[in-house]
Amino acid sequence: MEVVLSPEELEAVRRNKREIEKRFNDLEGLERTLRTLRLEYLREHRDRLREKLEEMRSLYKELVEFEGKAKRDKELLMAFRMELSEENKRLRKELEERR
């Protein structure tokens, strides 16, 4: 397991070096330190998961909006195509009548 410390945390470790060494020499202190490290790891993991969830929600919202826009665009194009088809029929009919 790798422990990554911020500069502030590293400075706190240096300031409390003797206390930390006492904890490592004492089994209960070692267990408290382990619980603290495990809790910090779990908090960081939870925070990363929350960020990822928020990102996924945002991307899903964009996707739903895109799908809605695509559906509206398709309907618009189909209506336009129908109008062109009707106009084409009308023009063909006029052309045949002139012949």
Image (tube, grey):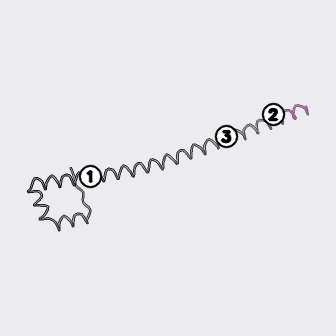
Horizontal side of 13 relative to 84 (left or right) equals left
Residue in the picture at 76% in, 39% down: 83
* Marker disc for residue 41: 1
The kind of residue tagged 2 is Lys
**Percent of width and height locating residue 32:** 17, 54
Horizontal side of 10 relative to 95 (left or right) equals left
* Marker disc for residue 75: 3
Of the two numbered discs 2 and 1 on the same chain, state the one appearing first in sequence.
Answer: 1
**Percent of width and height locating residue 36:** 22, 55
Q: Are marks 2 and 1 in contact (CB under 8 Å)?
A: no
Q: Quadrant of residue 10?
A: bottom left
Callout 2 crowding tier (Cα within 10 Å): few <14, some 14–19, many ≥20:
few
Q: Are marks 3 and 1 in contact (CB under 8 Å)?
A: no
Q: Which residues are magenta?
A: 86-99
Magenta: main secondary structure equals helix
Residue highlighted by disc 2: 89
Q: Secondary structure at mark 2?
A: helix
Q: Marks 2/3: CA distance?
A: 21 Å
Numbered disc in front, either 2 or 1: 1
The kind of residue tagged 1 is Tyr
Q: Secondary structure at mark 3?
A: helix
